[in-house]
Amino acid sequence: MNRRSLLKTIPALAAASQLPAQTSFKGRLRPGLVAYSYRDLLAAKKMTYEDVIRLTADLGFEGLDTTVYWFPDTSSQYLATLRRTAYKNGISLYSVAARVRLSQPTPELRAAEVAETKKWVDVAEKLGATHVRVFGGAIPKGATEAQAIDWAVETFKRAAEYAGSKGIILGVEDDGGLTTNAGPTIEIVKKTDSPWAGMNLDAGNFPKDGYAQVEMAIPYAVSTHIKAMISTPDGKKEKTDFEKLFGMFAKGGYRGFVSLEYEDKDPETAIPVLAPQIIKAARKYAVA
């Protein structure tokens, strides 16, 4: 290309660079799947994590939240095999979901949860994941919610310091107990006050008023799960409106994976039906 031709391209390049500002949303959403969706098959050893990775790709998803409960081991060799399988299938193993429970009533128990988090941060680093999911845990017997939050914050801060040294973000999930609703979960994140700590927002876990709870939590979300069903204001369940939910994520400025966690029976039949709906909604908000 000569100099005159190159100069002619500059106005077009400048115009193209302004395109994102013309869009009506701020999100950048990518469709993913949570390995927990196949929990029964994994637990029965009828599926392997390699099978789940390949199926994730076959269904058209882009990432997998690994839900590590059924890992046969965490050796470097095994994790390297998973990482290779993911690469060969174009799948991002973006998250490690562990059973850490932040709120513990004694220093010794909190230290144990920090150590457990560090273990899974190291696993995430080997997998190439940049997020680790943890739980808030139950409110310890005899404790107030305020005390439980402070204990969770202490654990979360110490764990986030280590995770941050590896470039990995921790997300506390709204999943019963102390973190049943958005309010206390957000308070844990705000009090932790770390760029390496946020909320793993599960839209399907709120017992009431799911959409309103999601809207409250979006600014603090570092990872998200969705389910086939979501709660109504009166605590009933209805089918999730994926386009509405994805639109909320985008409007709220969330960028990242939105992953299906299927909790009913027959995932082999149900997930292939849900996948195109989720991928379509994600594509609508795929570019910021």
Image (tube, helix red, strand yellow):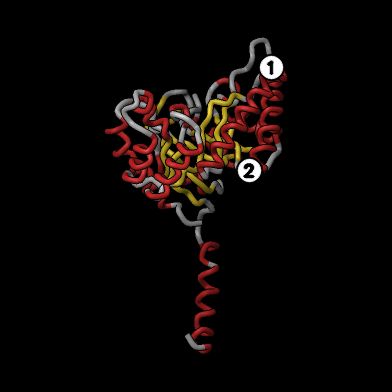
The residue at which mark 1 appears reads as 105
Residue 32, horizontal then vertical, whole percent: 42, 42
Above or below 170: residue 116: above
Q: Nearer the viewer, residue 163 or 268?
A: 163
Tell me what residue is drawn at x 66 percent, y 31 percent.
Answer: 156
**In terms of sequence position, does the residue under pointer 1 or pointer 2 come before the other?**
1
Residue 225, horizontal then vertical, whole percent: 47, 36
* Image position of 162 (left or right of 75): right
| Count of numbered circles on the image | 2
Q: For mark 1, give the secondary structure.
A: loop
Residue 95, horizontal then vertical, whole percent: 51, 39
Q: CA distance from mark 1 to mark 2?
A: 28 Å
Above or below 264: residue 212: below
The residue at which mark 2 appears reads as 166
* Image position of 48 (left or right of 234): left
Q: Nearer the viewer, residue 280 or 50?
A: 50
Q: Nearer the viewer, residue 262 or 285?
A: 262
Tell me what residue is drawn at x 66 percent, y 42 percent.
Answer: 164
**Which quadrant of the view contains residue 39?**
top left
Q: Can the viewer see residue 104 in this picture?
A: yes
Q: Amino acid at mark 2?
A: Lys
Which residue is farthest front? 77
Tell me what residue is drawn at x 68 percent, y 28 percent.
Answer: 155
